Image (cartoon, rainbow, N blue to C red):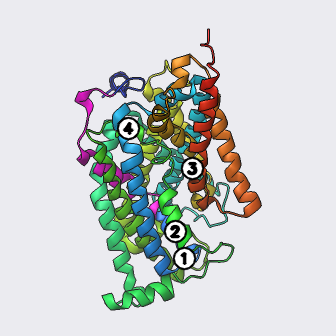
Amino acid sequence: MNLSQFTDKLNAVEEHERERVPERKLRSGRSFLGLYAGEHTAGTEFVIGPLFVAHGVTASDLVFGLLVGNILAVLSWAFLCAPIAVKERITLYYKLEKICGPNLTKVYNLVNALMFCFLAGSMIAVSATAVGIPFNLPLPTLQDVLPNSALWIGIVLVVGLVTTVIAMLGYDLVSYVANLAAPWLFLVFVAAAVAVLPEAGVTSLGDFWATANNKIWTGVPLEGQSKFTFWHVMFFAWFCNMAMHIGMADMSVLRYARSWKAGFTSGAGMFLGHYIAWGASGILYAIFLQQAANKLEFSPGPVAFYAAGLAGVICVVIAGWTTANPTIYRAGLALQSWYPKWKTWKITLLVGLITTSAAMFPALVMRLLDFVALYGLLLMPMGAIIFTDVYLLPRLGLSEEYARERGLRVNWAAGLTWVLTLAFCLALNWFFGLEIFFLGLPGWFVAVGLYLAMSKVLQAEKVPQAA
């Protein structure tokens, strides 16, 4: 295939950015099962699982916190996001434009795209730690912020290019890659963890719980790390994907579902990835720490190589891709409103360049728990606005999609709700010391109440239609 043919193929990709998904493009739940399993049994799992170890989670807090939190996450996808996605069959971004107006939506889309870029960048960095093994790439530590070598930058550029090209080819290829990779990624996670357990003294199933408490999730944080409890684990498991379910970002992928019940397929990702894989990677890291001279070493590639050899290295590389691909795809859709005349693949290429640049900074990986919590919190109020607009405003006799109906460039009820909700969450953090992991739940209810109240005031004033 020459360059001209490749460009023609990219131009032929149609993602229905500003229209309902046609019937012929709808997909069965099996397609989403693989997508969620692949995306959430992926690169982030090699980071988040070890970070729970570093923050001194106990074994019982991990087991029960993940159980409750992941159930709540699946229910959020199934009963909040998926029904709206199937009802509307348009992207999150086009729906927000109808509710909030094009100018406010552009601001949201920019914030959204940047957050997605940084998340995808962290996964490219994860893959790079594995690709760099044959080149003796210097390992990042928990304190690293800046790139530590030219070799690191070069490897990130190569991994970022491959990931971006896959995302440029559209949802079909993203879904295909996820379905292809998901089954064996999970098996490598589990097999690697089982393989290293004897080094911690586990020779039978009966030995595991005592070892888990004494040598893996000991309840003692590493130097410089804060202490996590059951509540940290539960709320993080629930809200680490807050932007996707409560924040409604997965409207953009679930709009292809035949039924809202496809939201339950998120359970494949939550329990294979955010339960078993987080636990498995925590085991790998804890045992790796016992062998490492530098107790602050934190590099998914070498950890996986230590446990599973070449299979572990390949697993880390592919795992980073299966997370970064759909994330770059979503970021491309978010930026479409800024460049509506550009083809989707050109937008995705721009996103890939931003993402790859961000991936050069190890701090994205080292502070991933805080970043994921912040990213979900920033986008959460708009999800509450969509929920309110679809379900609550009609029941109160108020207009849906008010910006579209009145020709507004900015729906100030939505804009003020976004700003005031984030201000409320910031106040909880500053004045009451509530950590970022716990801000999303009260914030969502505040956003619903604010949007209801301000919509009632705004619509009562009968704002004249814009010229």
Disc 2 versus disc 3: nearer the observer? 3
- Residue behind mark 2: 233
Callout 2 crowding tier (Cα within 10 Å): few <14, some 14–19, many ≥20: many
First in sequence, mark 2 or 3: give its number: 2
Residue 99, compared with residue 318, is above or below; it is above
* Numbered circle sitting on residue 74: none
**Residue 336 appears in the figure:** no
The secondary element bearing badge 4 is classed as helix
What type is the residue that disc 2 sits on? Val
- Residue behind mark 1: 57
What type is the residue that disc 4 sits on? Ala
* Numbered circle sitting on residue 445: 3
- Residue at 37% x, 91% y: name it: 207
Q: Report if the CB atoms under discs 4 and 3 are less than 8 Å apart.
A: no
- Residue at 29% x, 44% y: name it: 176
First in sequence, mark 1 or 3: give its number: 1
Residue 106: percent from the left, percent from the top? Answer: 59, 28
Q: Report if the CB atoms under discs 2 and 1 are less than 8 Å apart.
A: yes
